[in-house]
Image: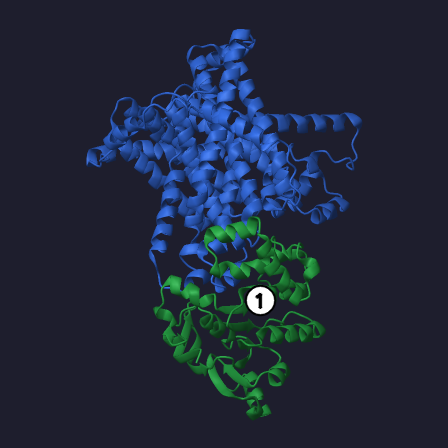
Amino acid sequence: MIYEARQVGHVYPSRTGAVQSLQGIALRIEKGERVALLGPSGAGKSTLLRLLNGTLRPGSGELRFEGRDLSALSRRELRQVRRRIGTVFQLPSLVPSLSALQNALCGRLGSWTLGRSLRALLSPTDEDKGLARAALQTVGLSDKAAARADELSGGQQQRVAIARVLVQDPEVLLADEPFASLDPALRAQLAELLFEVAKGRTLVAALHDVEMAMAHFPRVIGLHAGRIAFDVRTEQVRPAMIDGLYSPREAG
Amino acid sequence: MKRAAIAGAVGAGLALCWWGAGLHAALDLRALASFAHGLLPPDLSPAFLRVVGVATVRTLGIAVSGTVLAIALGLPLGLLATPALWRRGPLAAGERRGPSAALSWAAASLARFLRAVPDLVWALLFVVGFGLGPLPGTLALGINTAGMLARVYADLFEAVPPGPVLALHATGASRLQAFAAAIWPQAAPSLVAYTLYAFECNVRAAAVLGFVGAGGIGQEINLSMRLFEYGQVTTLLAACIALVLITDAASRRVRGRFQRNAVHGSGVLRAPVEIRARARTLPALLWMALLAVAFQQAGFLDASAPAHLGRFAARLFPPDLSPDFLAGVIEPLWQTIAISIIGTAIGIALGAVLAVPATATLVLDDRDPAAVPARALRTAAYAAARFLLALLRSIPELVWVLLCIVAFGIGAFAGAAALGLHTAGVLGKLYAETLEEVPVAPVEELRAAGATALQRLAWAMWPQARETLASYTLLRWETNLRLSTVVGMVGGGGLGLALYNDVQLGWYPQAATLVLVIYLLVVATDFLAGRLRAPPAAGAAPASALDLVTAG
C-alpha cells in the first residue's frame, strides 16, 4: 500500500473565518494503481493532491506514505519522500526565464545538493544535457531544448512539465487538472503522453473531463464539498452519481 | 465644508509645528548677499583643482565600495528575510515550524535596524570607532544601504509568481534550490535595476559623508564653508553636481537595458524587461582593477584598528535610560518631526510650482496655437524649471543646510528650509514626470473641447495622477524624517544636533539612547505610512523600491 488516509481533514485560514476544504477523508491507494479524482471546482481536489505530495500538512487525521506518517517526518525526510512523487500542475509551473532544458533538469533538484544544482543550472554537464534531451525527445520537443519557457505555447509548456517529471523519475505521479487550459485536440495528445509516462508508476489525477476518467482509469473517486462522495471501480459508476457530484443541491 | 475643515486642520498642524519647534525665519539679507558675492569667481587654481579631483575620486570610491558592501551583505539578508521562503505561504505549509522561521524574522529585524538608522548616524559612530577617514564612511554607507537593499530584495523575491516555486518544491527541491532555480531567475532583472538606483543614491550620500569627517567632496565643502572660502565652495559644488549628474546618466543607461522606460524616475512603475544578449563593454580584469581602486580610495587598505571599534561599541552600553535624560530627549524629538513636516510642506509647495512649467506635455505642445514669441517664452520657462529642479536635487541636503545657515542663521529653520529646497527638487521632478505619463485620451478630449493648458491640467491630468503624486509625497516624507534626524549634525537642530554634541563630548550612553530613539521614530513612521498607503497593484513595484526612487 502506497497511501493510506485516515479521517484526514484540512482547514484553510481565511479572512472571513476558516474554510473547511477537506473533511473525514479515508482512502487507500495501492502501488501501481490508477485513480481519477472527480468533482467540481472547490471540492478539494487540489488540496488532496497537495496533501499527497507532501507540500501541505493535514490539519487533522493521519496520512501515511508507505506506512510512514507524513506529519511526523522531519524536513529532510519529507524532501526524500517528495522526490519520489512527481506532480504535473495546471499552467504555469515552469520558470519563465529558464530554457526548456533547464526546466526539465529541475526535476533532479530533489536528488542534488545545492552546489550540484547550481552547476547544472549554470553549465550543465554532458550527462545532464543527455538526461534532459532524452526526456524532451520523449515528449516531442527535442528541437526546443534551448527555447525559453515563456516562448513556448501552452501545450509545449505542459510537455516540458511532463519532461521534468520524466527527469525526476518518481514512483508516484500526481496530476492536477493538467490539461484544463488546453484545447480538446491537444488535450487528447497530452493525455496519451501522460498515460505513457505513468506506465509502471502509481497515478492519481484530478480531472475535469469525466469521459477521460471513465475511459482510462479503473478507479474513480468523487469529491464533493471536501468529502468523498464515492470511491468505486469505474464500471460501478452510474450517471446519477456523476450528476450528484456536480449538482449544487446534493450536499456531500 | 469637508474640504475647508481639512485645509483648516492642515494649516493648524503646520502652525503648531512651526511655533512648537521654535522655528524662526529671519532672513539675513546682508550675510546672504556677501555669501553670493563670495561665490564668484570660482577658485580654479591648479592646486585647488587637484584637491577637488582627489575629493571627487574619493567620493566615487566610497559610493562604489559602499554599494558593493551593501550587495554582499544585503543579498543574504534579503534572502533570509523573505517571508515566502521561510515563514509562511506554500513552502512552509507542508512542514513543521522550524528554527529557520525565527532566523528569518531576525534577519528582517536586523535589516530594518540597519535601514532605519541613517547612514550619517552610522558614520558619526564609526568615525569615533575607526578614526577619521573614508573607511568609517564607507562602512556606514554599506550597512545602511544593505538594510535598504535587503528589504527591496525580499520584497522582489516575495512578489515572484508562486507557481514555478511550488512546482519545484514539490519535486523535493530544498528552499535554497527553489530560490536558485525559480525565484532568482524571475527576480534578477528588477533586482539589478533597483541596485543601480541604490548606487545613484549612494553617490549623493557619499558626497555628504565628509561632513562627519569621512573625506571626499563633503569634507572639502564643509572646510571651505567654515574658512569662508566661498569661491572654493562654488568649484566643489560644481564638481559634486557634475559627479551626480554623470553617474546618474551612466547608471540610467545601464538600467534602461533592464527596465522598460527607465529614463524617467517614475519609470520604476513599469515592468522590468530582461536582457537577452549581454554586451560586455569592459573585460572582467579591468572591472576588477577599477573595483580595487574604489576600495583603496574608500580606505580599506589603511584599516588600522577594528579592536578600537570594539572598545568604542562596548562604551555605548548600556544606553542612558534615566528619566531625566529621556525627558530632555522630547524637545529635540519634537523638533525633528517638525523639521520633517515643515521641510516636506516647503518641498511640496515649491516642487508643485516648478513641476507645472517642467511638464513637457503641458508646455512644449506644438499643437497649441501661439505666436512665436509666446512659444519661445514657454520653451525658456520649461528649460529654466528643469534646470532649477536638477540644481535643487543634485546639491545634497547637508550642503543646503550650510547654505541656509548663512541665510537664516543656525537653528531648526535652516534645517527645515534646507530639507524643503532639496525635497522640492526631488518631488518637482517626480510630479512633472508623473503628469507626463498620465494616459492621454482624457486630456485629448478636453483639448478637442477647447480647454486651455491649465484647464487640461486641472480637469484631466490632476485627477488621473493624484494618487501616484500622493504616494510619492508620503514616501518622500518618510525619507525626510530620516534626513531631519541628520540635518541637525551641521547645525540644523533636532535629534541630529543632540547626537552630534553627545558624541563630540564623549557621552556615549546618551548617544546610544538617541540612536535608539531615531530607530523607534523611523520604525513608527514606517508602520504609520504603511497603514496609510494603498497596497501596490499586482505587478507594480513594491513600496520599498519606490522608496529608493524618492530618496534621490
Q: Which chain is blue?
A: B
Q: Quadrant of residue B243?
A: top right
Q: How many marks?
A: 1
Q: Nearer the viewer, residue A248 or B381?
A: A248
* Chain that appears green: A
Q: How far from the left and from the top, in percent, is residue B286?
A: 57, 28
Type of the residue with mark 1? Leu
Where disc 1 sits, the SS reads: helix
Up the image or down, B124 lies above or below B327; here it is: above
Q: Residue at x 24, y 26 (%)?
A: B507
Q: Dividing the picture into quarters, in which one does residue B350 lie?
A: top right
- Which chain's residue wears label 1? A
In the image: residue B99, left or right of residue A103: left
The image quadrant that residue B290 belongs to is top right
**Residue picked out by circle 1:** A166
- Residue density around tag 1, few if under 14, some if 14–19, many if 20 or more, within 10 Å: many
